[in-house]
Image (tube, rainbow, N blue to C red):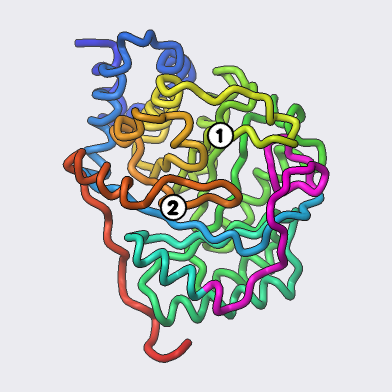
Amino acid sequence: MTLWESLADRVLTGEAADREAALAVLASPDEEILAVLAAAYRIRRHYFGRRVRFHYLLNAKSGRCGEDCAYCSQSARYETGIPTYPLVDREAVLAGAERALNLGAATYCIVMSGRRPRDAEIDQLAEAVQAVKARYPLRICTSLGLVTEAQALRLKAAGVDRYNHNLNTSARFTPSIVTTHTYADRVATVQRIQQAGLSACTGFIAGLGEEDGDLVDVALALRALEVDSVPVNFLIPIPGTPLGHRPRTSALRALRIAAMLRFVLPDKEIRLAGGREGALASLQPMGLYAANSLFVADYLTTPGQDPGLDHRMVQDLGFEVEEPEGEPAAAGPG
């Protein structure tokens, strides 16, 4: 029995993978990548079978953000040439929901740039979410920044199911990539949305210049926070940002990161998110032996791959795309 088979056995019997084991996965030699993925797949198959969840993103408010996140094209501090616009109207949100459903997504993710939304924006978005819920059997996730308790409760009442707020990296490395908010701010936001009854979608970005220990520390922090869904992003170096010069994460390293997450967070949704196409490249299908979820179509300010290729990839693996859950909340125009 290999080290990785033994680790999978222990995880499947309820033992939590520790920091040493997670570091070992990240440090595993290239020639063992198939063994690592095979062990991770045993865990993925146990909890999720052959199912793959598709998520669709709507960039509902773009750019002009006052934060200084070193990786982000939407910061007003950097010249990145992205489109900038205020919060879109209800019809645009509804159109995005229809596209999400047509692409096979079960979750519709509505994202706004900025540190924190204004109450008026929350009210506008809440009305749009209610309209979406009335028409489409979609799970709704929002990502709006450092929401207050009252704002989180308003979103929950409107029908939002899940809230995305990433930790992005470890507590140690956070000051290296942002100075306008703290790691503690992000943790507090995750706890706030959980207290409001929203499911937590919380992940990180690999390839920022962090060390293996930072990736493991953020994975363990996600486990401690008991988040439900973990998007793993791979840095897309955006010209004009401080990290625009960084190299992309290699395919084998991206696979190790996905596998490490599956060992540490065995029963959580793990999503190959922004940057997967560039990092994993032709090895994208192998990533689904550890992860069980994908963003389909485009990201916030960068294009994804053709959704038809994602459907074909899932089909070729012998996997299946999960259908949306439930029925619309009500009939009518919304």
- Identify whether 23 is placed above or below 98: above
- Identify whether 248 is placed above or below 236: above
Please state which amino acid type lies under the numbered disc 1. Answer: Ala
On the image, the x and y values in percent for residue 51 come to 25, 48
**In the image, which is nearer the foreground, mark 1 or mark 2?**
2
| Dominant secondary structure, magenta | loop
Give me the residue at 48% from left, 68% from top.
96
Q: Determine which residue is flagged by label 1.
A: 221
**Residue 297: which numbered mark, if any?**
2
Point out the image quarter for the N terminus.
top left
Give me the residue at 41% from left, 64% from top.
100
For numbered disc 2, what is the local secondary structure?
A: loop
Residue 56 inside the magenta-drawn segment: no
On the image, the x and y values in percent for residue 107 come to 41, 60
Question: Magenta stretch?
Answer: 67-93
**Residue 260: which numbered mark, if any?**
none
Q: Residues within 10 Å of mark 1 (few under 14, many from 20)?
A: some
Give me the residue at 45% from left, 57% from top.
56
Q: Residues within 10 Å of mark 2 (few under 14, many from 20)?
A: many
Q: Earlier in the sequence, mark 1 or mark 2?
A: 1
Residue furthest left as drawn: 318
On the image, the x and y values in percent for residue 117 come to 72, 63
